[in-house]
């Protein structure tokens, strides 16, 4: 699979991961809500680390900027 997550998209995802983790600890989420919040955070983090988002493939989205274009 080719990378399809750009730098700006990755930064936004990392900000969301940070917010979700802070919410998890600040609100003391447990049970299903806690698992859901941490699960989403882990998935977002994995897409940033690998640079691949499977949903983007389904919808044909690519947020990596093409070289030479402004």
Image: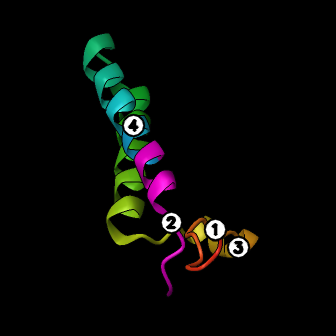
Q: Secondary structure at mark 2?
A: loop
Look at the image and give the residue range highlighted in magenta.
Answer: 1-12
Tell us which disc is closer to us: 1 or 4. Answer: 4
Q: Which of the two labelled residues, at mark 1 and mark 2, occupies the earlier sequence position?
A: 2
Asked whether 23 or 49 is in front, the reply is 49
Instruction: State the residue position of label 1.
Output: 56
Label 1–label 4 contact, CB within 8 A: no
* Quarter of the image where one finds residue 21: top left
In the rendering, at what x and y percent does residue 69 appear? 65, 74
Label 3, label 1: how many angstroms apart (C-alpha)?
5 Å
Alpha-carbon neighbours of circle 4 within 10 Å: few (<14), some, or many (≥20)?
A: few
Q: Is residue 23 left or right of residue 25?
A: right
Q: Secondary structure at mark 4?
A: helix
Asked whether 44 or 40 is in front, the reply is 44
* Residue sitting at x 59%, y 77%: 66
Tell us which disc is closer to us: 3 or 2. Answer: 2
Instruction: State the residue position of label 4.
Output: 15
Q: Which of the two labelled residues, at mark 3 and mark 2, occupies the earlier sequence position?
A: 2
Magenta span contains residue 11: yes
Label 3–label 1 contact, CB within 8 A: yes
Instruction: State the residue position of label 3.
Output: 58
Label 1–label 2 contact, CB within 8 A: yes
Q: Which of the two labelled residues, at mark 4 and mark 2, occupies the earlier sequence position?
A: 2
The tag on residue 5 is 2
């Amino acid at each position: 699979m080719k990378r399809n997550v750009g730098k700006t998209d990755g930064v936004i995802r990392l900000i969301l991961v940070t917010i979700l983790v802070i919410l998890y600890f600040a609100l003391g989420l447990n049970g299903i809500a806690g698992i859901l919040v941490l699960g989403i955070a882990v998935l977002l983090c994995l897409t940033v680390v690998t640079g691949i988002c499977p949903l983007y493939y389904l919808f044909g989205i690519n947020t990596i900027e093409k070289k030479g274009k402004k």
